[in-house]
Every structure is written in C-alpha cells, then in structure tokens.
Image (cartoon, grey):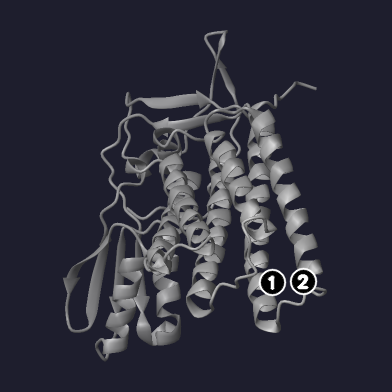
C-alpha cells in the first residue's frame, strides 16, 4: 500500500472517560496503512521534547522504498548523480530503464556507482532495464563504527605521509586512491543511514541515537571526508613533486602533524566518553597549530628557497592547515552535542 504523502497532521480533541482517563482517537487511515485492527497494540513513548510518539507494536505490513530512473529523462551526464541520490534517499530497489538499451559508458557508470557505495548489487539485468538491490541493513553498522573507520583511514594516511616527508619510501602512499574511495563510500553510507534515522523512529532506536545527534554525526562525517580529500591531495603533491631538502624535522609542516594526531585522538574518544575538557584541549592545540602554519606561509615570501620549493611548501601547509581547521569543526560539533545532551526543558 502506498502511503499518502499529503495531510500527515490532524488536530483531534481529548476526551475524558471514566472520570480519570484522557483518550484520543487514531486516524482510520493511519490504522489501515499500518495493518492494525481493534485490540492490536501500539507503543506510546514520551519524547524528551515532551511530545508523545505512537508506533505500531506489531504490524503485518512490510514496506520498502523504490526509485525508478529513466536515462532518457535525466540524460547520461547526470546518471551517477541520480543513482547516488536514490541511494541517499534510502531506496532498497533502484530500477534504471533505457528505451534504447545501455551503452558501455552507462555500464561504466553503474560499476562506478557500485564501487562508490556499500551493499548495492545488481539483481536482474535485461536489455533495457537493470534492477539494483541494497543488501545492507542500516542497523548492522552503527554510526560510531563508520566514523571510527573514517578516522583510522585518515590518520593512517597522515602517518604514512609523515614518514615519506621525513625521508621514507613514497611507495607506501600507492594505495592513497583506494583509501580516498573508501572514505567517500563511508560518507555516503553514513548520510544514507542518517536520512533513514530522520524518517524512521524504529531505526532511531535500533541505531542507539536520536535524530538531532544523528544530524550532527552527519556533519562530522563531512569533515572527515574533507580531511580525506586534503590527505589525498598531499599524497598527489608528493607523487608529482620532489620533497624539498629544505624541509626539516623542526619545520611547522612536520611538528603540526603529531599535534593533529593527539587532538584527533581526544576528539574521537569523546564520541562516547563525553569529557568536554578534552574537547576544549584539542581545539586549543589545533588553533595553535593553525596559527603556526599561517605564520610559516607568510614567512615563505621572504625565504630564498626557490620558487618550486616555496610552492610545494605552501601547498603542503595549506592542506595541513585545512586538516587542522576541519578538526576544530569537529570539536565544535562535539561541543554542540554536549550542550544538547545537558540541556533541559522547563515549564513556563
């Protein structure tokens, strides 16, 4: 049964029965949509906001979200955008149709989409239609696990970058592109999960977070994606340009990295530990590193190290500075979550 997307709000009067109990009737359409009948049970939850949430305790109705894409309507240039949009919408079934069949470039886009996402497989394929199915249960990978995996990918890549900048073999950066793709896939998975949480109270409970915090976690994931972008940018810079000999271990370009590692360790641990003083400490350390990098970039104008070396160091410094800046964004998000958790609502 397709759910009516219009008129999801109604005003109903409270009724007093038995002299001490207030009741309110449920809309008949809502009862029918959820496959309920007289004497079936519903769960009533008192939310932190003071609102009541009514959910079917048992229902025989099974639903899934489906998206159909017509290549003739959207054009090949936007095919990947629409596939990712369908994935983020929480679609379990994605159907792609083409009146003239699928070209090699279409199939290349399909492969790229499957590699960029998690849990998507082609289940049926015909000359003019393809059906993709999401096999991943959103609750099987908690939000904290996805964030922690992104952190490990970025931090390990920055650790390898440090080794190369201080004289190590650049071959350890050969898998930079694979790490970048995994970070992007985790970002898409997290945004899909958050979207589903915002729509489903049941998923909100099974994922162990509320909707407000889920939206904040989505912001954290975007900061990790940007950190991943800049770590990949540094890898490409090292691959394409020779590291200047003038880069010493005492340079802010090197000394800022352990500061970033220590700060990120504090921040990632406070996704669960909730010691706000550690979040403050991390933000102050990162701000200090950013200030040192800004001063370093300004001093490059007066250094006689050659134009190529100066350009290398400036680009490296900019990416490291942005890495620290995105980490301060994460600290601010954690402060937001801390204050939300500690807020109370009072009756006026």
**Residue 128 at what x, y percent from top left?**
22, 83
Out of 190 and 184, give the one closest to the viewer: 184
Report, in whole angstroms, how far the alpha carbon at label 1 lies from the one at label 2.
8 Å
Out of 246 and 307, give the one closest to the viewer: 246
Instruction: Please say if the residues under marks 1 and 2 sit with CB atoms less than 8 Å apart.
Output: yes
Determine the residue positioned at 35% across, 25% down.
Answer: 41
State the image quarter where residue 2 is shown: bottom left
Q: Is residue 4 visible?
A: no
Determine the residue positioned at 57% across, 49% down.
Answer: 220
State the image quarter where residue 20 is shown: top right
Viewport quadrant of the C terminus = top right
Q: Secondary structure at mark 1?
A: helix
Q: Can you say whether 313 is above or below 48 in the image? A: below
Determine the residue positioned at 45% across, 74% down.
Answer: 81
Q: Secondary structure at mark 2?
A: loop
Q: Which residue is mark 1?
A: 314
**In the displayed structure image, the side of residue 335 where residue 170 appears, left or right:** left
**In the displayed structure image, the side of residue 115 where residue 176 appears, left or right:** right
Number of numbered markers: 2
**Residue 238 at what x, y percent from top left?**
51, 72
Q: Can you say whether 347 is above or below 335 in the image? A: above
Mark 1 or mark 2, earlier in chain: 2
Please name which of the two marks, 1 or 2, marks the residue nearer to the observer: 2
Q: Is residue 265 visible?
A: yes
Sort mark 2 into few (<14), some (14-19) or many (20+) by Cα contacts within 10 Å. Answer: some
State the image quarter where residue 58 is shown: top left
Q: Which residue is mark 2?
A: 300
Mark drawn on residue 154: none
**Residue 78 at what x, y percent from top left?**
45, 81
Sort mark 1 into few (<14), some (14-19) or many (20+) by Cα contacts within 10 Å. Answer: many
Q: Can you say whether 166 is above or below 339 in the image? A: below
């Amino acid at each position: 049964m397709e759910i009516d997307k219009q008129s999801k709000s109604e005003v109903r009067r409270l009724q007093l029965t038995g002299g001490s109990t207030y009741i309110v009737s449920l809309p008949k359409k809502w009862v029918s949509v959820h496959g309920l009948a007289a004497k079936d049970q519903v769960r009533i939850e008192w939310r932190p906001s003071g609102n009541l949430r009514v959910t079917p305790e048992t229902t025989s109705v099974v639903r899934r979200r489906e998206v159909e894409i017509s290549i003739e309507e959207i054009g090949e240039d936007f095919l990947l955008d629409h596939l990712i949009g369908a994935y983020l919408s929480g679609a379990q079934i994605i159907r792609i149709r083409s009146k003239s069949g699928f070209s090699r470039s279409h199939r290349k886009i399909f492969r790229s989409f499957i590699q960029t996402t998690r849990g998507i497989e082609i289940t049926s394929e015909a000359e003019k239609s393809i059906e993709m199915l999401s096999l991943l249960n959103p609750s099987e990978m908690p939000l904290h696990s996805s964030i922690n995996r992104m952190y490990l990918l970025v931090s390990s890549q920055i650790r390898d970058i440090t080794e190369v900048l201080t004289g190590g073999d650049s071959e350890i950066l050969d898998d930079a592109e694979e790490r970048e793709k995994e970070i992007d896939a985790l970002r898409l998975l997290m945004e899909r999960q958050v979207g589903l949480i915002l729509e489903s109270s049941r998923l909100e409970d099974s994922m162990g977070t509320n909707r407000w915090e889920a939206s904040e976690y989505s912001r954290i994931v975007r900061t990790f994606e940007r950190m991943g972008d800049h770590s990949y940018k540094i890898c490409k810079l090292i691959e394409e340009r020779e590291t200047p000999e003038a880069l010493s271990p005492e340079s802010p370009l090197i000394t800022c990295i352990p500061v970033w590692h220590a700060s990120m360790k504090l921040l990632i641990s406070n996704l669960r530990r909730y010691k706000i003083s550690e979040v403050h400490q991390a933000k102050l350390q990162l701000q200090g590193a950013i200030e040192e990098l800004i001063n370093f970039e300004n001093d490059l104008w007066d250094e006689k190290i050659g134009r190529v070396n100066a350009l290398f160091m400036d680009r490296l410094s900019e990416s490291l500075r942005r890495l620290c800046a995105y980490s301060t964004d994460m600290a601010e998000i954690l402060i937001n979550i801390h204050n939300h958790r500690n807020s109370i609502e009072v009756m006026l």
